[in-house]
Amino acid sequence: MLGDIRALNTYTAPDMYPIPRIQENLNQLSKAKYITSMDALKSFHQNVLIPKNRKLLRIITHCGIYEYPRIPFGIKNAASHYQRMINRIFPTQLSEG
């Protein structure tokens, strides 16, 4: 599904959640005892939209009205929301390095 969400983004208050800087991550990584990697395929699409917000992302087509069940690419605060989710899942791993 494809939709133009620019209008929604203009009315969305910015979420000022900090996104880590690459250099900070590399500095922390250099001190780590163990290193692993994680493939976050389609990571933004792993964030479920709560039902009351789905109506804001409706798409009307000749086949009917559709709603995104998950956060689509292009939403203003998607990166902040995703980073918050990662920090909740891996709190000690991200803070201790």
Image: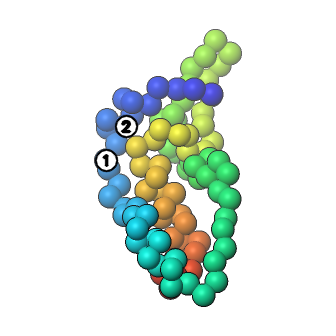
The quadrant of the rendering that contains the N terminus is: top right
Helix, strand or loop for disc 1: loop
Residue at image point 64% right, 83% down: 34
Residue closer to the observer: 60 or 91: 91
> Can see residue 46?
no
Residue occupying the far front of the picture: 30
Callout 1 crowding tier (Cα within 10 Å): few <14, some 14–19, many ≥20: few
Residue at image point 61% right, 52% down: 43
Residue closer to the observer: 53 or 82: 82
Do the numbered discs 2 and 1 sit on residues whose CB atoms are within 8 Å? no
Helix, strand or loop for disc 2: helix
Residue type, numbered disc 2: Asn
In three-dimensional space, the C-alpha distance between marks 2 and 1, rounded to whole angstroms, equals 8 Å
Residue closer to the observer: 7 or 56: 7
Residue occupying the far top of the picture: 62
Residue 36 location, x and y as percent?
66, 73
Residue 79 location, x and y as percent?
46, 52
Which residue position holds label 2?
A: 9
95 left or right, relative to 10: right
Residue at image point 47% right, 38% down: 74
Callout 2 crowding tier (Cα within 10 Å): few <14, some 14–19, many ≥20: some
Which residue position holds label 1?
A: 13
Residue 21 is tagged as none
Which image quadrant is residue 6 in? top left
36 left or right, relative to 60: right
Which image quadrant is residue 24 in? bottom left
Q: Please determine whether, in this image, residue 39 is positioned above or below residue 89.
A: above
> Can see residue 53?
yes
Q: How is the image coloured?
A: rainbow
Q: How many marks?
A: 2
